[in-house]
Amino acid sequence: MGDPKSKPEKSGNLLHRSKGLRLELSGIQEEETFHEWVVELEMFRDCPEPIPLKGAVKAEGSIYKSGTTVYFTAQAQGAFDLVCSRCARDFEAPFKAAVNAIFLPRKEEPGAPVSEEDAGEVETAYYDGETVDLFLPLRDQVTLAEPMRPLCMEDCKGLCPRCGADWNEAACDCSDTSGDPRFAELKKLFNTKEG
Ligand SMILES: [Zn+2]
Ligand SMILES: [Zn+2]
């Protein structure tokens, strides 16, 4: 993120830098237009479920309309501020989320025009009046991108349940099984048998 080279090249003036995610229906064209959005952290503050975002979410995508139906696709990316479920350390986890949504005017029957092959991948959203709010489907996908059991790394060794040492840093004495009193007893037994 932040590297201008990582941005896809869009021909000419097609890539619009858009601030808001609320668009007037009349301003959405029938021809697909490409946009880049920066959704500030502030926008996510009122979410019903708090999302542990590290900062703003960037999204690149396109939008077009056909009649009163609006089609929105975007790739969102950002980073979560997470706590490892094994070792409790804070870490930053970049994420990407694909957003595919169809907006219908609220008055239409819910769900009706979603084609079967799209079901499950395309979110149906509704707009009131003349304003289409792209934020909700974006927020939904960002929420889904958050891991249920965050791990700072795939093979995080976690903490010693006895002394709390971070096994990613170093092994503690407790992890040496000879230090386990029960194991010492067993050892004694074996030694007497053999000796
Ligand atoms: Zn960890
Ligand atoms: Zn230990």
Image (cartoon, rainbow, N blue to C red):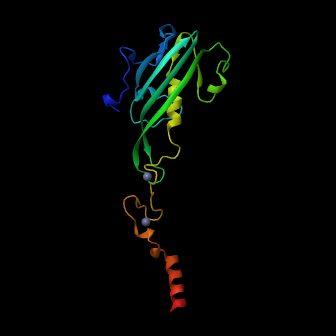
Name the spot of residue 142 as percent of width and height, x first: 49, 32
Horizontal side of 15 relative to 100 (left or right) equals left
Outermost residue toward the top in this view: 26
Q: Is residue 168 left or right of residue 72?
A: left
**Horizontal and vertical percent position of residue 149:** 52, 47
Quadrant in which residue 10 is drawn:
top left
Residue 107 shown left or right of residue 152 in the figure: right
Q: Residue at x 38, y 26 (%)?
A: 8
Residue 2 percent location from the top left of the image? 32, 31
Q: Residue at x 40, y 66 (%)?
A: 172
Name the quarter where the N terminus is drawn: top left
Which residue is drawn at the image coordinates 40% and 22% (left, top)?
Answer: 36
Residue depicted at x 43% and y 35%:
53
Vertical relation: 47 (above or below) 130: below
Pinpoint residue 46: horizontal percent, then vertical percent.
49, 28
Closer-to-camera residue (18/129) = 18
Image quadrant of residue 117? Answer: top right
